[in-house]
Amino acid sequence: MPPTIIVDLLKKVTGELAFDISSADVRCSVFKCLPIILDNKLSHPLLEQLLPPLRYSLHDNSEKVRVAFVELLLKIKAVRAAKFWKICPMEDILVRLEIDARPVSRRLVSLIFNSFLPVNQPEEVWCERCVTLIQMNRAAARKFYQYAHEHTASTNIAKLIHVIRHCLNACIQRTLRECPEAHKECEKENASVLDKTLSVNDTASMAGLLEVIVILWKSIHRSLENNKEAKGYTINKFASVLPEYLKVFKDERCKIPLFMLMSFLPASAVPVFSCGVISVLRSQEESATGRSYCTLLDCLCSWGQVGHVLELIVDWLPTRPPQAKSNLASKRKVPISDTCPVKPELALLYMEYLLTHPKNRECLLAAPQKKLNQLLKALEGSKADLESLLESPSGNPLNFNKAAALHAFGLYCRLSVHLQYTFCPGEKIHLSILSETGSWLENKVLPLLQDQEEEYLKLRRDVYQQVIQTYLAVGKDVVMVGLGDPEFQIQLLQRSLGIMKAGTQHLFSITAVFEKAVRTDNWFILPSLTLSL
């Protein structure tokens, strides 16, 4: 074939077909055929000129096109036809790595792996490249190191962890030398080549490096479990420096990865910190908007101390007042006033976090059944508060406010299913508590919906909606994961029909309830049960 025709054909392919907006299959086919052409070395000079305009195909709205384009870049790198970063700039690659799903991301990591983790170069270079990547795109750096263990040995990942630790120690040493009055615990570590270019005041880089350590440690967790010597060495090294890190890195962005690192260590390795975690959780403010408590809860669960959290939650949740006793018995008892304020809304947040994260939920459900039943009983009090809210315009909840009562009711429904699934003996799962909740809804809530006047219903419509939505959503999820036997399914259908009949005069609100209850991404869904099965 004459050279001019070949050139025209390639220009047609790369200049028109690669941008065919009418068909993703056509665009995908272009990038699947170009690697075949690259096998012919004589095509390299021409393709080096034709390929750079295709750079935006990395951001194609079709995933299969993006995958095919990255495969093309990998082929270009393999045959050394051109520098892949001249065809697609590194900035674009990192942006796509940050936001794309696994099929594209893992190929991008393979593409740039040697650029940011050159295992054939000194370890100090690994750290320099790590800092460079963090400074270029911190989110992309997290994604890169999430997949890094797939491209190198676990020993190299462990080495990188300790190289970064040396780098952080060197930065702290430099600060301590500039502030002679400061502590000197970290002076034994070797200085890093980055000593003069990094500073503990560079919070973004420090937080990024700490996050990378967490990600890398998680990625080789199983390998460390199988290598007791390496695990012990790593634990001892971090146990000696983490207390100092907590003193130096005070920004919230640094604290979260530091707390996560603490959770990887035994409680005995960091006694000062581990003894103070429950006090920090107790002193949290209900009005705080942050979620710093999450990593602290993770720590306690990983240390096997979820019982302390459970005790705190139960103490904070309101309970029904005890039965009145005789005056003589009450006079014999010394009244004791507890000065620690209760924080029921914060207790519900702690409970929700434990219940919605698989590892923490596993620890929670391993607690004594008596304690868990006590917790379930405290959450059940939300039903009485919701009744009080719905019965009269001036109804004041006995224990929870409106938002907390609705939150507690949702947790009560979900926890009841988890407890019965965990502790119910035999093959058949009896959802008796959830069925009792359905009876309560049928006998207490729906009659109020039918009997009350329209003006009052407008004031409490959101409460009716959320209560019904919560029950239906949990019931639907139980059926979807196969825990609901035919008897429960029939009950759920009958109650759904009852809700529809009760809502005939309020069709708009009831329709909204059903639309939200059948959404698969609903907040009250039970993905955890799917995992546990």
Image (tube, rainbow, N blue to C red):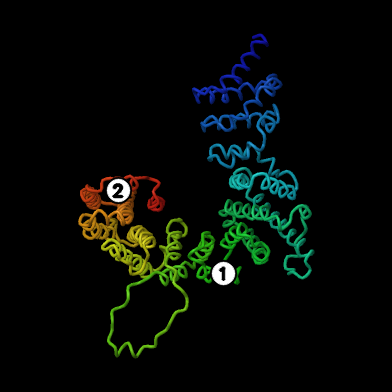
Q: Residue furthest front?
A: 455
Q: Are marks 1 and 2 in contact (CB under 8 Å)?
A: no
In this picture, is 246 found above or below 49? below
In this picture, is 349 found above or below 21? below
SS assignment at label 1: helix
Determine which of the numbered discs, if any, sits on residue 509 in the image: 2
Q: Amino acid at mark 1?
A: Ser
Q: Residue 240: in sight, yes or no?
A: no
Q: Position of residue 83 (x, y in %)?
A: 70, 31
Mark 2 Cα-neighbour bin, 10 Å: few <14, some 14–19, many ≥20? some
In front of the other: 94 or 290: 290
Q: Which residue is mark 1?
A: 274
Q: Position of residue 144 (x, y in %)?
A: 61, 44
Q: Amino acid at mark 2?
A: Ser
In this rendering, the label closer to the viewer, 1 or 2: 2
SS assignment at label 2: helix
User: Which image quarter is the N terminus in?
Assistant: top right
Q: Position of residue 172 (x, y in %)?
A: 73, 61
Going by the image, does 251 lie left or right of 387?
Answer: right
In front of the other: 90 or 316: 316
**Residue found 31% across the figure and 57% down from its top:** 460
Give the distance between the C-alpha atoms of the residues marked 1 and 2, in whole angstroms.
49 Å
